[in-house]
Amino acid sequence: AAYRAGYTPEQRRQIERDLFSGKLLGVTATTALELGIDVGGLDAAVLLGYPGTIASLWQQAGRAGRGDAPSLAVLIALSNPLDQYYMRHPAELFGRPHEHALIDPDNVYVLQRHLPCAAHEAPLGNIAGPGRFDDEQLFGPGFVQAMVQLEEQGRLVFQGDRWTFAGSGYPAEKVNLRSAGGSRFAILDESNNYRTLEEIESSTAMQRVHPGAVYLHQGESYVVSRFDSEMGFAVARPAEVDYYTEAREWSDVRIMRSLASRPIPGGYAYFGHVRTTSQVVGYRKLRHYSEEVLGDEPLDMPASTFETAALWWDLAPEIAQACARRGLDFLGGIHAAEHAAIGILPLFAMCDRWDIGGLSTPRHPDTDA
């Protein structure tokens, strides 16, 4: 059986019961089975690729074996740079300490999700009173800016010297602690009275369940026939197909402001805030196993825009000129460097490489480089 977070609670509980009782001898799972679930005594754990952190590595390996019973954990490396680095330096893998979960209290994207939850419980302000903490000291220097932005969005209201929650309901229900994604997106089974197959993050819905997409659920293929971004659902029907689909995306990154910079060999490195716009413009059908391209289909999907933090490099013109003189592919080189940077980022930050996006271009309108 397969197991992942998008399955309905009933589906997940049934799989857990079958695994614990021994009815199921094995399960193919995402990181959803990594923490917080008692799955009984498993004999072996096979990890497909380095999971991104040492903590996750040992949590997943530790799913096998209880008490004094012998167990086996196998890590099968993938072809990405980080996996291959650890295969060449296994002592680094086994000797590396687990990571510390660090949170930047000045991260405005985190603050804007959590501050309405705090204001719902008690009014917030930056003026200390008798027996009360200064909220600006608790939430960091970005507190006031975040509160003003939330007020402009109509999520908070300023009364006297305090901000109070302006919405209705319980805001914490809409905050996902496992990811930065917001609401959930339902996938409905057309052949079963439109029953919910599973749910995915809305932020990835256009890439995964666009019209014509092939979606796998419990080993069965479904083809998406309808996509409703406003209502938050896609309709799919069972289909036996010999291909899978891959979304084709257009993306644009605009620099809002630079917060820090430093010289590097051949240019400058920057850190700051950017606005990212992406749009699924089509999809490709590829035959299983052979990867033969069976066709390209156009799509007209709505664009998605969000703001985030970014790291970028400006390279000196001399580097491109030197590549041209030597007959080297400059565009291919910077594209490879982009993927390499994404691949090794989990060495330095607690993140999944698939949460990181990148863009390489010979010239950017906001840098003129």
Image (cartoon, rainbow, N blue to C red):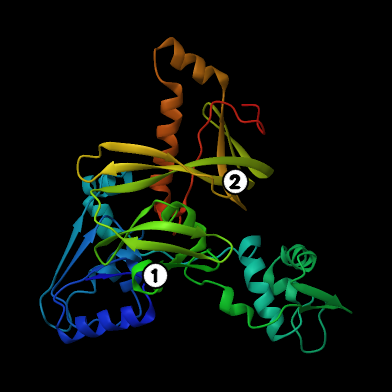
**Residue at 30% of width from left, 45% of height from top?**
80
227 above or below 267?
below
Q: Secondary structure at mark 2?
A: strand
* Camera-side residue of 252 and 317: 252
Circle 2 crowding by C-alpha within 10 Å: few under 14, some 14–19, many from 20 = some
Q: Mark 2: which amino acid?
A: Thr
Q: Residue furthest bottom?
A: 131
* Camera-side residue of 18 and 42: 18
Q: Residue furthest left?
A: 70
**Residue at 63% of width from left, 72% of height from top?**
114
According to the picture, the residue beneath numbered tag 2 turns out to be 277
According to the picture, the residue beneath numbered tag 1 turns out to be 6
Q: Is residue 11 left or right of residue 349?
A: left
Does residue 38 appear in this view? Answer: no
Q: Mark 1: which amino acid?
A: Gly
Residue 70's x, y, as percent?
10, 76
